[in-house]
Image (cartoon, grey):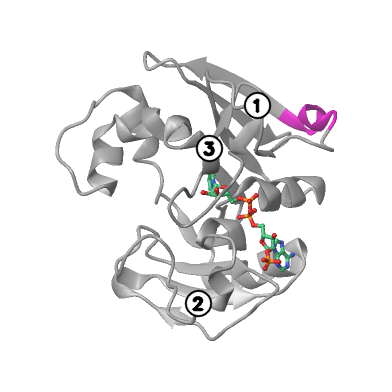
Amino acid sequence: MSLARVQHISVSLDGFATGEGQSLEAPFGHAGERLHEWMFATRWGRAMLRRPGGSGGVDDAILRLFPAGIGAEIMGAGKFGYPGWHENPDWKGPWGSNPPFHTPVFVLTHHPRPSIEMKGGTTYHFIDASPAEALETAREAAGGQDVRIGGGPTMVRDFLAAGLIDHLHIVVVPILLGRGVRLWDGLEGLEKDYEVESVSTPSGVTHVTFTRAGL
Ligand SMILES: NC(=O)c1ccc[n+]([C@@H]2O[C@H](COP(=O)([O-])OP(=O)(O)OC[C@H]3O[C@@H](n4cnc5c(N)ncnc54)[C@H](OP(=O)(O)O)[C@@H]3O)[C@@H](O)[C@H]2O)c1
């Protein structure tokens, strides 16, 4: 069975998964790097930045599960680029010529454009579709593997509200952002449909998983 999975979305204590004022120079707005310091302290995170070093502990072990069993990703237009990227015909996302996905990636946008093939197996497809339609399309491309619901918070919230997420892994970071885009709005009682576990790691973050009951 092909699952729809959210992997390690970082959320502040007050529920924000990105800050206010996103731009090309500040992809997370006023949050800066604070939501992902835990990640970029690990060996996996350092390797993403093409830098040596980093910790090899529990956070690192969890992050290394990123590609396991994933055959396609769906992401929102706000993750793919800065506000207004669709007006830039040369924009190919912020991850360089060989992005870390290595699968088809479906970018939800009201401004579709032709697909872009990148190095390493990532191809960006731009679709204007409902969450259910996008998931069906991504499942076909995933060849029986799972589909990563990649964020940002607006699209994850939409997929949760539509009851489409089988497994949700969020990382609660002990900071207060005060403003930005919230993950949980409109999802009161969501936990009733899931088995919930949490574990804190020595870095100070708490990994919380929601697994659809009966899976
Ligand atoms: N904390 C984390 O771990 C994490 C993870 C990933 C991303 N982020 C951050 O989150 C931010 C982006 O999140 P966000 O909530 O602002 O935006 P988002 O969820 O990435 O994208 C939302 C946008 O996608 C398009 N869209 C969504 N659903 C659609 C549909 N059904 N059909 C067509 N288009 C649709 C719309 O853009 P248009 O109308 O403009 O096309 C919408 O405004 C960035 O700062 C990113 O760096 C954080």
Residue 152, x across and y down, in percent: 60, 49
Q: Residue 30 carries which label?
A: 3
Residue type indicated by callout 3: His
| Residue bearing mark 2 | 88
The total number of labels drawn is 3
**Residue 59: horizontal and vertical position, in percent?**
37, 27
Q: Residues within 10 Å of mark 2 (few under 14, many from 20)?
A: few
In the displayed structure, 135 sits above or below 26; it is below
Please report the residue visible at 28 percent of the width from the left and 39 percent of the height from the top. Answer: 44
| Among the 4 quarters of the image, the one containing residue 111 | bottom right
First to last magenta residue range: 188-194
User: Is residue 191 highlighted in magenta?
Assistant: yes
Q: Residue at (42%, 72%) from the top-left corner?
A: 92
Q: Which of marks 2 and 1 is nearer the N terminus?
A: 2
- When the figure is inspected, residue 39 is found, relative to residue 149, above or below; the finding is above
Q: Is residue 189 magenta?
A: yes
Residue 154 vs residue 144, the one in the foreground? 154
C-alpha distance separating marks 1 and 3: 10 Å
